[in-house]
Amino acid sequence: MDYLLELVKQSRIGWSDVLDVTIVAVVFYEFLRLIRGTRAAQMAFGSALIVALFFISQWASLETLNWLIRNMVGYVVFAVIVLFQSDLRRVLARFGQAPFFRYFARSDRADETVEEIVMASKMLASQRVGAIIVVEREIGLRNYIESGIPLDATVTYDLLATIFQPSSPLHDGAVIVQDDRVAAAACFLPLTVNLRFSKDLGTRHRAAIGLTEENDAYVVVVSEETGGISLVIEGRIERNLDVEQLSSKLRKLVVQRRSSPVRRSADLGQEF
């Protein structure tokens, strides 16, 4: 222990060392998160086991095991590339979409997400198909996501329209959009207990209000009875929006997400 303390005292840790360790930690974390639940995770575990055996063989002077591992590594790497090429391709493709890099492409995807939600709302409203679409912002919705059926799919008009069809087993509940992806469907939301709202509000509208009373998410609701489109945020509801109004308001919310929290709160107060 004294040796370690003396070594720490003699070491000069600069900002470049901290940055170096931080980048490596983030990259390693994102890599592990991306391979979780895939065959690549088993590959990573096997690789870690081989590395551990290599150091154990050196420490315990197990010459035969050490020789075997040193001569086997080259063939193992080649076999991994051949056997797991599809998984590696998927991991590398998704790594560019990880939160560490996501800021650079967020703007375009957010605009596309808004467009898909607006198109789906228009179609569902024309057919009087009830829907509730929740978009996560700064405060996480993990508890509500876990109450539904996980999807982790790209937000598209076709997917949203299919989910809310009465014949779909996922239609009864809310869709939650997280980081411009459909995180889950058939999610349960808390109902508002506020008595100041009109009694003609249905369960979907009350669930949207109840959720937004607790966090900063915004919710698009399509009424099954009237086909009206509503937008709910911070426990307040604006009803009977047309497609142009909905698109305009959602795009403003996307812009406000990129601005400072103080400005965003002020803008939302003026908007509703």
Image: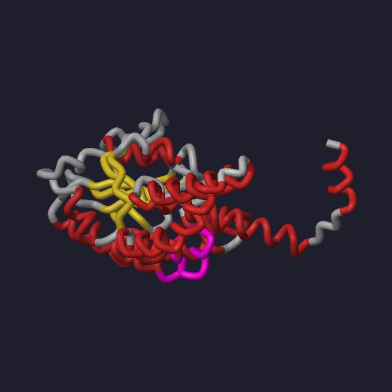
Q: Nearer the viewer, residue 160 or 67?
A: 67
Residue 55's spot in the image, x, y percent?
59, 47
Q: Which residues are magenta?
A: 96-108
Kindly tell me whether residue 63 is visible in this rendering: yes
Q: Nearer the viewer, residue 176 or 222?
A: 176
Residue 43's spot in the image, x, y percent?
39, 51
Residue in the picture at 15% in, 50% down: 128
As for residue 97 lying within the magenta part, the answer is: yes
Residue in the picture at 73% in, 57% down: 18
Kindly tell me whether residue 250 is visible in this rendering: no
How many marks the image carries: the answer is 0
56 vs 243, left or right, is right
Residue 268's spot in the image, x, y percent?
51, 55
53 vs 237, left or right, is right
Residue in the picture at 33% in, 50% down: 39
Q: How is the image coloured?
A: secondary structure
Figure quadrant of the N terminus: top right
Q: Is most of the magenta stretch helix, strand or loop?
A: helix
4 vs 183, left or right, is right
The single residue placed furthest to the front in the displayed view is 64
221 vs 105, left or right, is left
- Compared to residue 138, the image places residue 258 above or below, namely below
Quadrant of residue 143 within the rendered picture: top left
Residue 50's spot in the image, x, y percent?
48, 48
As for residue 104 lying within the magenta part, the answer is: yes
Q: Nearer the viewer, residue 205 or 181?
A: 181
The single residue placed furthest to the left in the displayed view is 167
- Compared to residue 33, the image places residue 209 above or below, namely above
Residue in the picture at 37% in, 32% down: 190
Quadrant of residue 209 within the rendered picture: top left
